[in-house]
Image: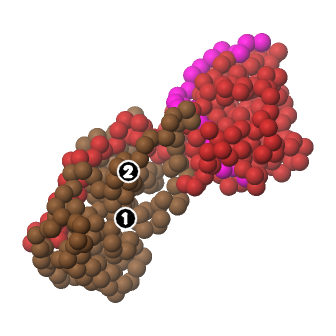
Chain colours: A brown, B red
Amino acid sequence: MHDWQEVLDTLVRERGRALVGRAYLLTGDTREAEDLVQDALVKVFAGRRAAREIDSAEAYVRRAMHTIYLDGFRRRRHWATIRHLAAVPASSPAHGLDGPPDELVGNRLVLAQALQQLTPRERTCVVLHHLEDLPVDEIADLLALSTGTVKRYLADGRANLRTRLGSPDGDAPTPERLDLIERRTR
Amino acid sequence: MNDELHDLLADLADTVARGAHGLDETAAKRVTTRVRRRRVARQTGTGVAAACAVGALGIGAAQVREGSPSLPAGTPGTTSTPPSRTPTPAPTRAASSDPTVDDDLSDATPQERAAALGPAAGIFWCGEEVGVTIQTRPDADGIVLAADDDLSMVLSAGSSTDTTVEVAGGSYALVGADGTVVGFVVPDDDEPSYASFTPGSSLGLDGPLHLVACEVDGPETGDRLVAWPYVPVVLHDFDAGTAQTVVAIADPRTITVP
């Protein structure tokens, strides 16, 4: 077994679920999140300089998820639509493809829904900056955007989140009010 | 970290992760296969070009010629073709043994080798037209392929064949109404097996199971497509220490996506 394959196996086994959780913030759908993680793993490990340590490999995969997501991974997947020829199509889950996992209730559900109301670029910038701790200039490099554009996406994304988290739709469970603190952009 | 949004996002991601199945064994295997295929494709680029150049000088015309009009590609919308038990000999030279084989290629399956070499050889490739001429080449040891209605295939040895073959399950390339490849039907498991081929012997191949569309909005249920049966085969000459990859192709037929 090659070095890259051992790292890949370990990464999938030990960090696969965590990666799916991160990817969910972008996709809003667990199945699409799994697909996104798979695409990111392929991109990283098929590269010329595949990471040979778990931590660095995970970091590469997490960044790759964002670029693939913004590149429209769903449109470019050639091996995405796979189904068993003899199988009866699986019934759709009650909540539909875009529904949240059952575990999401209360504030988490509201946040998941609020994230999905952001544009893909707003969502990506917010996650990269506030979760992955990337400074603005690194986000700009990663996504091939100007720093000013990234700052605008961050400001718009935060404003939209604040609005939606502060005044949820009528049918949604009433959350506690979440006071988001604007973080100084670097 | 003093950032409420960070905490909220991390909490949401962790909650989803706890409830997620992660990547199961099948998904993990699929990732590994895709990685290996891409690495093989990247690393064979130079080797394929070199092999083609040598082939043009020493062997002559390739067996599969792009754009050849001699074989109709079938007409979607017509009734299904009858079972074709009479095989059309179609070993197709994809590439000779690659002098630049590295550690990633050394354990590549025939499917991976063919997937890597196919595009360069002008064989089935997503979004591209199919134009092949089926001929028999002596350097393919007379290998012939036959496919049945149940999608199973039989690989047969010619009258002078005496070699060891390495082969996985058979596949179908699916061609849409516009004449371009829109997908594939591939085996569930592409693990290769070895068989000794002597004159008149044959080898049954597992029927393919999975429809793999080139695009997300690819073939729909009820679509009629022209299906080209094919299987990559590695011909081994252990005495000489060489291996040659060929792609055996049978007559196309029209199928309906179930």
The reply to whether the magenta stretch includes residue A181 is no
Who's the residue at 17% across and 71% down the image? Answer: B5
Q: Chain of mark 1?
A: A
The local secondary structure at tag 2 comes to helix
Residue A9: x, y in percent?
A: 34, 40
Q: Are marks 2 and 1 in contact (CB under 8 Å)?
A: no
Residue A22 visible in the shown view: yes
- Badge 2 or badge 1: first in the primary sequence: 2
Look at the image and give the residue range highlighted in magenta. Answer: B180-202
User: In the rendered view, would you say B242 is above or below A31?
Assistant: above
Q: Are marks 2 and 1 on the same chain?
A: yes
The reply to whether the magenta stretch includes residue B191 is yes
Who's the residue at 29% across and 69% down the image? Answer: A115
Q: Nearer the viewer, residue A125 or A101?
A: A101
| Mark identifier at residue B195 | none
User: In the rendered view, would you say A11 is above or below A22?
Assistant: above
Residue A91: x, y in percent?
A: 43, 43
Tell me the residue that label 1 is attached to: A66
Q: Nearer the viewer, residue B208 or B258?
A: B258
Residue B7 position by quadrant: bottom left
Farthest front residue in view: A171
Residue B247 is left or right of residue A133, and the answer is right
Residue B95 visible in the shown view: no
Residue A77 is left or right of residue B96, and the answer is left
Q: Nearer the viewer, mark 2 or mark 1?
A: 2
- The C terminus of chain B - image quarter: top right
Tell me the residue that label 2 is attached to: A31
Residue count near mark 2 (Cα–Cα under 10 Å), binned few <14, some 14–19, many ≥20:
some
